């Protein structure tokens, strides 16, 4: 099984190839933190990881992409690339949400929770993208777009750790209620490497990848301007 994974949903751009056969795994991944410009660097990254894996595009069995939440533009970039590549190669598609990928990435980076933990990403305007995951990175709740204090109200009593750049917002809100929460991995981003692991473990595919937007777009149609013409 050869899985090509793509992520452009937040503040990093990454591509990975995971080759798994006969009980062995080979992972080839590249990731660069960047607030914008994902479209220009994603396909060169794809070429790089395929070359390192010794594969051509038609050798890929599954193409995975993060679906959001995240940047409106960023989410669409990986999904569009995955759709286009699948159309050419006839590979299957897989998608999952960005926060589930971050939860898996946290475990890969060394987080060792003894119980559930939270992923929180600053969504601006006093809100966070939020989810709760068990010690194996499996989703218990989310992803949600909520205010930090509302997120704290959803935390199970035994949860003590939050990761992501919204972890401090969650911690501050918890402190107001007299609850202790420890922020960790506050620079954590979704990663194609973690996405590839999830795709392999899942074994599932989908016919269509659709963006997961938890808030409406900032841009609005200029209805009045159109009506005046």
Image (tube, rainbow, N blue to C red):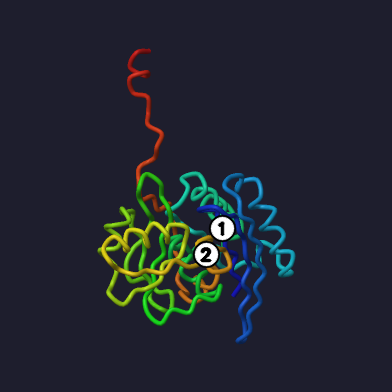
For residue 18, side relative to residue 114 (left or right): right
For residue 178, side relative to residue 22 (left or right): left
* Frontmost residue, 95 versus 130: 130
* Frontmost residue, 182 versus 205: 182
Of mark 1 and mark 2, the one earlier in the sequence is: 1
Residue extending furthest toward the top = 229
Q: At 66% from the left edge and 52% from the top edge, which residue is drawn? A: 43
Q: At 71% from the left edge and 70% from the top edge, which residue is drawn? A: 53
Q: How many labels does the image show?
A: 2
Q: Is residue 163 above or below residue 78?
A: below
Q: At 50% from the left edge and 62% from the top edge, which residue is drawn? A: 186
Q: Quadrant of residue 179?
A: bottom left
Q: In the rendered image, which quarter contains the N terminus?
A: bottom right
Residue extending furthest toward the bottom = 23
Give the x, y percent position of residue 128.
Answer: 37, 54
Give the x, y percent position of residue 190.
Answer: 52, 61
Mark 1 is surrounded, within 10 Å at the Cα level, by few (under 14), some (14 to 19) or many (20 or more) other residues, namely many
Q: What element carries label 1?
A: helix
Task: Return the residue at label 1.
Answer: 86
Q: How far apart are marks 1 and 2 (CA)?
A: 7 Å
Q: At 74% from the left edge and 69% from the top edge, which residue is drawn? A: 54
Q: In this view, does 30 lie above or below 35?
A: below
Question: Mark 1 and 2 residues: CB-CB less than 8 Å, in contact?
Answer: yes
Give the x, y percent position of residue 74.
Answer: 52, 48
For residue 71, side relative to residue 178 (left or right): right
Mark 2 is surrounded, within 10 Å at the Cα level, by few (under 14), some (14 to 19) or many (20 or more) other residues, namely many
- Using the image, tell me which numbered label, if any, was put on residue 161: none
Q: Is mark 2 on a helix, strand or loop?
A: strand
Q: In the rendered image, which quarter contains the C terminus?
A: top left
Give the x, y percent position of residue 139.
Answer: 37, 70
Task: Return the residue at label 2.
Answer: 92
């Amino acid at each position: 099984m050869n899985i090509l994974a793509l992520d452009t949903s937040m503040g990093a751009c990454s591509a990975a190839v995971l080759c798994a056969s006969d009980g062995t795994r080979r992972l080839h991944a590249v990731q660069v933190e960047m607030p914008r410009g994902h479209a220009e660097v994603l396909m060169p990254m794809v070429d790089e990881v395929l070359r390192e894996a010794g594969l051509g595009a038609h050798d890929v069995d599954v193409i995975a992409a993060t679906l959001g939440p995240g940047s409106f533009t960023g989410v669409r970039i990986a999904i569009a690339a995955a759709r286009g590549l699948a159309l050419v190669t006839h590979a299957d598609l897989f998608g999952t949400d960005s926060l589930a990928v971050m939860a898996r990435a946290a475990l890969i980076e060394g987080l060792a929770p003894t119980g559930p933990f939270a992923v929180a990403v600053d969504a601006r305007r006093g809100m966070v993208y939020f989810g709760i995951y068990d010690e194996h990175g499996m989703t218990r709740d989310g992803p949600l777009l909520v205010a930090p204090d509302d997120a704290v109200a959803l935390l199970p009593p035994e949860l003590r750790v939050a990761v992501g750049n919204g972890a401090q917002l969650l911690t501050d809100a918890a402190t107001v209620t007299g609850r202790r929460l420890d922020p960790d991995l506050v620079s954590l981003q979704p990663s194609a490497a973690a996405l590839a692991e999830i795709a392999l473990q899942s074994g599932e595919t989908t016919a269509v990848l659709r963006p997961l937007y938890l808030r409406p777009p900032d841009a609005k149609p200029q209805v009045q301007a159109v009506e005046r013409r």
